[in-house]
Image: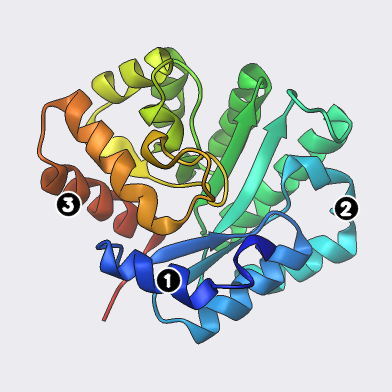
Amino acid sequence: MEAYDADRGDVLRRAAEAGVSWVIDVGADMASSRRAVALSEGESAVFAAVGVHPHDACTLTPGALAELRALAAEPRVVAVGEIGLDYYRDLAPRGEQRRAFEAQLALALELRRPVIVHSREAREDTLAILRAAAGGQGGALRGVMHCFSGDVEFALAAIGLGLHIGIDGPVTYPRATVLAEVVRQVPLEHLVLETDSPYLTPQPRRGQRNEPAFVRYVAERVAELRGLSVDEVGRVTSANARALFGVKMS
């Protein structure tokens, strides 16, 4: 994203110094998807995801979908995303959001790529569309509910469909009691740690731009909630992410 244009190399260096061995740079529209692929081709620690966010659902024309198919087949691309539904901001008509979500889910299943799913104030429609996609492919759906903000019931329903639960900076916020309960109750084997950089900076760095190095604060809070060491949380959630996205580091 443009937020890193001035110091992208330093951001990646700080991530490595903080113990982050690899990063998924996630596209939100066609332009950022192209840039994510380009960055991944020049940085060995960066992989890409390509997709059109629900805010930009109207831009997913047949031509854009064809380009997305070509991008998703690139060797450094490990997922289709960020895709899904956002009924909170409603920046695109809900019918267009559902159409774009369904089309990109179908693409991910066709290419055997996991998905990175955004769902905000759209729980029932998100689950209905995911169920239809999973059912049509014999339960072959894989992916992550990105920056999860729902409750335990929602989390378990998503896990039942083949998805992991993505935990981000908000878990460190004092008022995030529902999310804290999700972290306590969901099996660690179904959690992955994220940042949503440059947004949702963890509490210890609130007011600053978020970046991959700050995922450490998410790990520390998850460890506290689970009664585990940070190293154990890092080991398990990193293994979860590697298996989910098929990442192999040399």
The mark closer to the camera, 2 or 1, is 1
Are discs 3 and 1 less than 8 Å apart at CB?
A: no
List x then y, in percent, for residue 240.
Answer: 28, 49
Position of 165 compared to 5: left or right?
left
Picture residue at 19% right of the left edge, 34% below the top: 223
User: What amino acid is labelled 3 in the image?
Assistant: Arg
- Nearer the observer, 110 or 36: 36
For disc 3, the marked residue is: 235
Position of 162 compared to 61: left or right?
left
How far apart are the two marked residues, 2 and 1, measured between alpha carbons? Answer: 30 Å
List x then y, in percent, for residue 80.
Answer: 59, 56
For disc 2, the marked residue is: 59
- Nearer the observer, 102 or 116: 116
Picture residue at 25% right of the left edge, 21% below the top: 184
Badge 3: few (under 14), some or many (20 or more) residues near its Cα, within 10 Å? few
Q: Quadrant of residue 233?
A: top left
Picture residue at 40% right of the left edge, 21% below the top: 179
- Nearer the observer, 199 or 158: 199
User: What amino acid is labelled 1 in the image?
Assistant: Leu
How far apart are the two marked residues, 3 and 1, measured between alpha carbons? Answer: 20 Å
Instruction: Please determine whether, in this image, residue 116 is positioned above or below residue 5.
Output: above
List x then y, in percent, for residue 32.
Answer: 70, 64
Q: Secondary structure at mark 3?
A: helix
Instruction: Please determine whether, in this image, residue 173 is positioned above or below residue 135.
Output: above
Earlier in the chain: of badge 3 and badge 1, it is 1
User: What amino acid is labelled 2 in the image?
Assistant: Thr
The mark closer to the camera, 2 or 3, is 3
Picture residue at 53% right of the left edge, 63% below the top: 25
For disc 1, the marked residue is: 12
Q: Secondary structure at mark 2?
A: helix
